[in-house]
Image: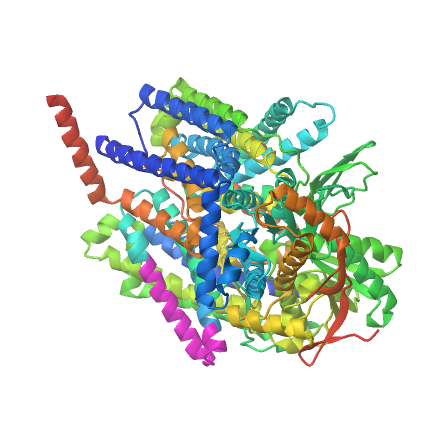
Amino acid sequence: MEKKKNIFAALFGEGVRNRTFSFIIVIAAYIILESMRRSGSLSSLFTGLLVPICCYVIAAIGLNLNVGISGELNLGQAGFMSIGAFTGISVSGCLASSLTNPTLRLIVSILVAMLVAVIFGLIIGVPVLKLQGDYLAIVTLAFGQIIMSLVTNMYLGFDENGFQFSFVENRTKLAKGGKMLLSGPMGANGTDRISTFTVGAVMIVLALLVVYNIMYSKSGRAIMAARDNRIAAESVGINIARTKMLAFVISAAMAGAAGALYGLNYKTLVPAKFDFNTSILILVFVVLGGLGNMTGTIIATVVLVLLPELLRPIADYRMLTYAIILILTMIITNNPVVRKFFGGLKLRRDTAGREA
Amino acid sequence: MGFLSYLISGLGLGSVYAIIALGYTMVYGIAKMLNFAHGDVIMIGAYVSFFALNSFGLSLPVTILLAVTVCTALGIVIEKLAYKPLRQASSLAVLITAIGVSYFLQNGAQLLWSSSTKVFPSVFGNGSITIGSLSVSILTIITIMTCIVVMVALTLFINKTKTGRAMRACSEDKGASTLMGINVNSIISITFAIGSGLAAIASLLLCAAYPSVFPTLGSMPGIKAFTAAVFGGIGSIPGAFLGGLLLGIIEIFAKAYISTQLSDAIVFAVLIVVLLIKPTGLLGAKQNEKV
Amino acid sequence: MKKTKSITRFFAIVMSACMMMGMAACSSSDSSSGTGSNTSETKAEVVQGEKEDGTADKDTSSDSAALTIKIGGSGPLTGGAAVYGNAVKDAAQIAVDEINDKGGVQFDLKFEDDAHDPEKAVTAYGSLKDWGMQVSLATVTSAPGAAVSANYQEDKIFAITPSGSSLAVIYEDPTNESDPYGNVFQMCFTDPNQGVASADYLAEHTDLGTKIAIIYKNDDNYSTGVYEKFKDEAAEKSLEVVYEGTFDASNQSDFSVQLGKAQAAGADLLFLPIYYEPASMILTQANQMGYAPTVFGIDGMDGILTLEGFDTSLAEGVYLLTPFSADAEDELTKSFVESYKAKTGDIPNQFAADAYDCVYALAQAIEAAGITSDMSEADICEALVKQFTSMTFNGLTGTDVTWNENGEVSKSPKAVIIQNGEYVGVEE
């Protein structure tokens, strides 16, 4: 995988400065937005977007670990979100009567969702990581589609007699007062909306901590070495399979957590939500944010989630404009002349700085 | 319906996938990019054919010619405007741009022609040929024949003509090709032109079999055909052909004998198994690792 | 490396600046929506609108401005389901324009895109709320509707959905049909209602066929909802179902397998609780196979005759239970079809008809309750719930339409058969 720096790449310098900066913007954004929300000065539109933005940011950070740091093009991130989301919803649904504190229930649901996503990450990671390049990419795409197809065919309900599960055909017959957790293609309905922006923000901070710890640890350097030159890395005794698996599984866990947070933020969730387009959407966040650059990923995610909303006034031309902006951004940020121009600015400023 | 008739409908569906997959595989072989907008070129081809047949009452040969021309031109324009500026950029940047182009075409089509479904006129009639107890529709036969003709023509073109040889050279080594006096840029344009022309033919066959025309029509056949291309070994023309046919057959068999709901999951599961046994697809070139 | 860093820094700054501006814009519009400044804006808009029409005289303009009620609504205007959202948006706008021209209650309609996605529906809801929506058409499709109904309940804004037919749109606990939201109403039938009605009809008319095959779309709330109740009711009435086939959004073009199996099972009646687009495909492919069962559809089948390019001879003899058909001869339908054609160039389907009825039902209820735009959303909501549960409405999709306190509509579907390319009412 080529290591190309993109628009937000290496935003405020590598290493410690970058790390500190990303924590500062997340925490500052949280404090500002949360206080605005509490005082009621944040618009309904923006309030509604807080949690989904957190979810996308977490999933994108996870994917960036996979694509940017580990160098594996993963086109199935939405599959892990799906696993996490429906696990989280089911857990929360089961615990609704026994665990009444919503925040505690949310945290338990997210943890279980992460665990399940990790198990699936391990199972899927074995075949996926045997392949390389575009073949690896298509297998992740295939797993994403398979997960969607399987979740679409699952029916899970419970009543006072316990759980009922059926596959492909809905054979569940619930007693009065029972609750369907998963209804096949219709997904989950009547979910308790327990996700909060605070939990989302805390999760982003935790995700950043985990990713930075990996990036700047021995295993992180091993992962990056394996990305840049697999054979050289192997020759110095790095266990490629293990390091790549680590990145893959952590990425899956983050997607699972993001999915659970997402699923528990809406009354209803359909399995078709986590299709190929959602995987691609998250990949767009990562690529635009810069491979291996977490701060960039966060900013790109926020901007790209907000963009279609800010374009609402132009109604019919909204998505067309979004597409054009996407294409132009990619072309302009990769244009040698533009790069050179900004490079020149930077050079002059640096010289000026040194003279002063 | 018995085994044989399922096999034949599978071959019919597979032939359409194969023609679309050829477009994917050629572009990948030369430009080393996944052109996710390919499915949407099919959609444009379908709309052009629909209006040519329905609103202007053109004859079938003229319609085919028109659709192929429009799609070819569209392919060249997309390549020039969106992909050419990114020749030096990372493959991921190109991938995202292709997705942008796909969004653009879908939303553009919706603005131009509204989101309501249009029904494609019946172009090849509803006739069928009965051999014993087996009944095969003319359409399926035409589809399979077209696919074979396209496949043979493309193989001859690649192997026998000067441009074809230049294309093969480019897919091997762009730098060396340039040194040998091959204009790599024009070869890439020609590849896009051919791929998009094939998309136009695929759109006609697709819509003749499944007569609905709508703005997102190309997405699903696009993903399936991409899968088919990888299945056969991306970059390989016979591979795309084989992958397309097999994918079509597996899909129909999965629906017929296992479950209509799980057919997609089965298709992708087979793909994964194949790639684990042959990591570069059925007919893909083995990747040599450079140290 | 250094060069790229500076570009990225530049972009980061520009992008974050954009973001901050966006946020500020959002919040500023929010703060103004509750105050007087926004109302005056609306007033100006209305006055301007009337000047353009040249219809309203000076006296009513100030009156009507005081009565201008803001209607919100969302539906898929882009993406695969866009056809339904656009139908609702256009039809609702026609109804709003007609009502505004009459004088009396004045409406201002704002219809947002939700791309048939619950997430986008919630943001669309936020956007509408920031704009100052007072009553709503909720959402066009079911899944997004189920996502925002709780918001409508929390914020006490009255909503009536033209076509969100799933139980989850009006009940918080759809499994047990309990905990209705109470202020979210439906203009369309609930899905179960249609399933039961279809099974009952088939049980009474065994001449249509006795061996039933069903093909339904299993990732669609509407289709599955109808199918499930149909199956239960069919078992009750001891109808013989010989084949059940499904398809989903990624497999809605090839039906050769499902049709082949239905034919092999000897089905002489094909029940299609699906929309007309895939139904047209099924009819075409059945014809190619030489399979000709009696086809029975529900309201989603309406629209098949006006599908651009569809060979309507294939739909000859298709039965459907529907509350609306665009070929009806009454004055109301005729004038609506005419205005819809003039506006969009298309012939309206049941989504459009339901949307048109929604706006008129709202107008009737608002007038009867004496609601004015300066009332709070909660007061409007309370008054409307009271009106809707007690009033009777006559519209395009039914006469003597009533609602129960859960928001479910009661109207009777009519059986029609397609003959000579037209819908013809079936004599009972």
Image position of B89 with respect to B113: above or below? above
Residue C400 counted in the magenta span: no
Whether residue C71 sits left or right of residue C395 in the image: it is left
In terms of depth relative to the viewer, which is nearer, B272 or B113? B113
Q: How many labels does the image show?
A: 0
The image quarter in which residue C309 lies? bottom right
In terms of depth relative to the viewer, which is nearer, B287 or B215? B215
Image position of C346 with respect to C254: above or below? below
Q: Where residue B244 appears, x then y in whole percent?
A: 51, 57
Colour basis: rainbow
Specify the segment rendered in magenta.
B51-78
The image quarter in which residue B22 lies? bottom left
Q: Where residue C419 appears, x then y in whole percent?
A: 71, 79
Q: Where residue B204 appears, x then y in whole percent?
A: 49, 69
In terms of depth relative to the viewer, which is nearer, A213 or B163? A213
Judged by its main secondary structure, the magenta piece is helix
Image position of C98 with respect to A92: above or below? below
Q: Which residue lies furthest to the left in this view?
A: A355
Residue C106 visible, this angle: yes
Q: Residue at x 41, y 24 (%)?
A: A28
Pick the quarter of the image with the N terminus of chain C: top left
Q: Which residue lies furthest to the front in this view?
A: C59
Q: Where residue B144 appears, x then y in whole percent?
A: 53, 68
In terms of depth relative to the viewer, which is nearer, A102 or B79? A102
Residue A269 visible, this angle: no
The image quarter in which residue A60 lies? top left
Pick the quarter of the image with the C terminus of chain C: bottom right
Whether residue B287 sits left or right of residue A347 in the image: it is right
